[in-house]
């Protein structure tokens, strides 16, 4: 019983990300040929309905902005519209790009599952508990904050209208987002339908954003676990010149090569998705921070603060895990150099030298060829956001 409680499964690391994926009509784990016909049809319907509704929402947001541009006389109103449009567009791009790479992603996840330690003894060697704690400390707060932010944005207006209805009998038909409709959206029978449409668009936006970023962070945690294990085993090795030393060293090198290959494949799968995260984050942080600093009403202050923290935490999570990839890959080379290799055979030393040479070039989490995810990148994004913020604030002061 005690062993069962200690045992951790691969799904415990990926479970939350997989749930978000399935809610969008995607299944990163199951190959297409293993799915039933009904399940395939259902997933396609969910995917088409969700992405179609999201693209419709983006079109309605852009139309509203264009039609209202002459009416929006100050920057405060314009910056209130842009963050939702930007994050919706980024989420739609994320889900489509990752979906198009799903055939490349699924084999990687299955191979990582095969490499996952299958016994309690192996998991103790890998120090599984440490990485589970990492998931709870870093990834879980992102999920909770995302769900809270999405819920507040979706239900704030209807909750406020409901409270006012019970107070004074007046129910004001307000929507969570700024959409343009070519008909009257205030009729009793249209309002619940349109509100559901906007709620679903908001859910897909949040789901697509968190699903792609969260799955990337979960995979990077697996990379880190295997790279750290390789480093620890290299440090523990005390070669005596036997054939077993060379055999075990080759096994560690093969594991290292496999993880590095996975890293390159993951960059192909999530490169555009990460780029969307970085490109959209600066203007969103800028405009949302501007809304908070200028003085929104007390009712919406918490909503914008949550949205700002959510965006900062999302970008930080991706950049932090990018830094993990860099540090863990460099530690392999340090561990190889730091072991007691002096008494090893010449063949062993040659093989070890190849490993050290390869490990000097660290792996990276890349947003295509433009950006490398790291804490330095996060610092640059914050700096750029502040520069935009200062510019918008100056324009606002000039108008007033």
Image: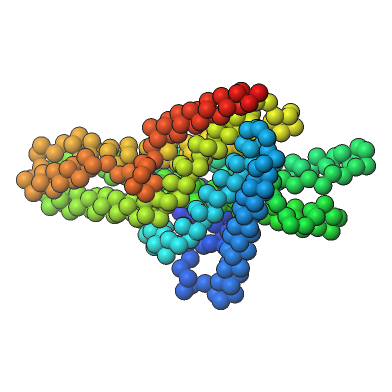
Residue 321 placement: quadrant: top left
Q: Is residue 236 visible?
A: no
Spot the residue most to the left: 346
Q: Residue at x 10, y 37 (%)?
A: 342
Spot the residue most to the right: 169
Spot the residue most to the bottom: 37
Q: Is residue 238 visible?
A: yes
Residue 339 placement: quadrant: top left
Query: Residue 225, image x and y in percent?
Result: 37, 45
Query: Residue 175, image x and y in percent?
Result: 75, 47
The quarter of the rendered structure image containing the C terminus is top right
Q: Residue at x 61, y 68 (%)?
A: 45
Query: Residue 349, image x and y in percent?
Result: 11, 44
313 left or right of 335?
right
Which of 133/316 is in front? 316
Which of 26/385 is in front? 385
Which of 172/360 is in front? 172
Q: Residue at x 47, y 47 (%)?
A: 276
Which of 66/90 is in front? 66
169 left or right of 160?
right
Q: How many marks?
A: 0
Residue 86 placement: quadrant: top right
346 left or right of 378?
left
Looking at the image, is 318 positioned above or below residue 399?
Answer: below
Q: Residue at x 52, y 27 (%)?
A: 391
145 left or right of 339?
right
């Amino acid at each position: 019983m005690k062993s069962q409680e200690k045992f951790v499964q691969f799904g415990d690391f990926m479970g939350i990300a997989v749930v978000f994926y399935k809610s969008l009509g995607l299944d990163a784990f199951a190959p297409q040929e293993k799915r039933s016909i009904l399940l395939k049809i259902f997933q396609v319907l969910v995917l088409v309905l969700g992405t179609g509704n999201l693209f419709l929402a983006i079109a309605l947001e852009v139309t509203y902005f264009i039609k209202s541009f002459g009416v929006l006389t100050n920057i405060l109103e314009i910056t209130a519209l842009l963050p939702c449009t930007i994050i919706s567009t980024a989420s739609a791009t994320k889900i489509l790009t990752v979906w198009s790479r799903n055939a490349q992603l699924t084999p990687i996840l299955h191979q990582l599952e095969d490499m996952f330690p299958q016994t309690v003894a192996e998991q103790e060697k890998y120090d599984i508990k440490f990485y589970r704690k990492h998931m709870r400390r870093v990834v879980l707060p992102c999920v909770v904050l995302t769900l809270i932010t999405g819920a507040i944005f979706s239900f704030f207006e209807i909750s406020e209208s409901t409270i006012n209805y019970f107070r004074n009998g007046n129910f004001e038909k307000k929507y969570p987002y700024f959409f343009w409709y070519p008909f009257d959206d205030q009729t009793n029978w249209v309002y619940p339908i349109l509100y559901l449409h906007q709620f679903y668009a908001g859910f897909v936006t949040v789901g697509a954003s968190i699903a792609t970023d969260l799955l990337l962070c979960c995979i990077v945690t697996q990379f880190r676990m295997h790279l750290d294990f390789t480093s620890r085993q290299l440090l523990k090795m005390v070669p005596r010149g036997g054939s077993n030393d060379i055999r075990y060293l080759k096994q560690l090198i093969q594991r290292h090569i496999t993880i590095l290959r996975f890293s390159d494949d993951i960059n192909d799968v999530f490169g555009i998705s990460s780029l969307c995260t970085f490109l959209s984050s600066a203007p969103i942080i800028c405009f949302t921070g501007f809304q908070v600093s200028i003085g929104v009403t007390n009712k919406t202050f918490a909503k914008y603060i949550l949205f700002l923290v959510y965006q900062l935490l999302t970008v930080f999570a991706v950049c932090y895990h990018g830094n993990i990839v860099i540090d863990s890959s460099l530690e392999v080379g340090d561990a190889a150099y730091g072991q007691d290799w002096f008494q090893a055979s010449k063949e062993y030393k040659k093989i070890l030298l190849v490993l050290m040479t390869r490990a000097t070039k660290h792996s990276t989490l890349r947003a295509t060829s433009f950006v490398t995810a790291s804490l330095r990148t996060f610092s640059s994004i914050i700096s750029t956001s502040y520069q935009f913020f200062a510019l918008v604030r100056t324009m606002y002061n000039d108008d007033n």
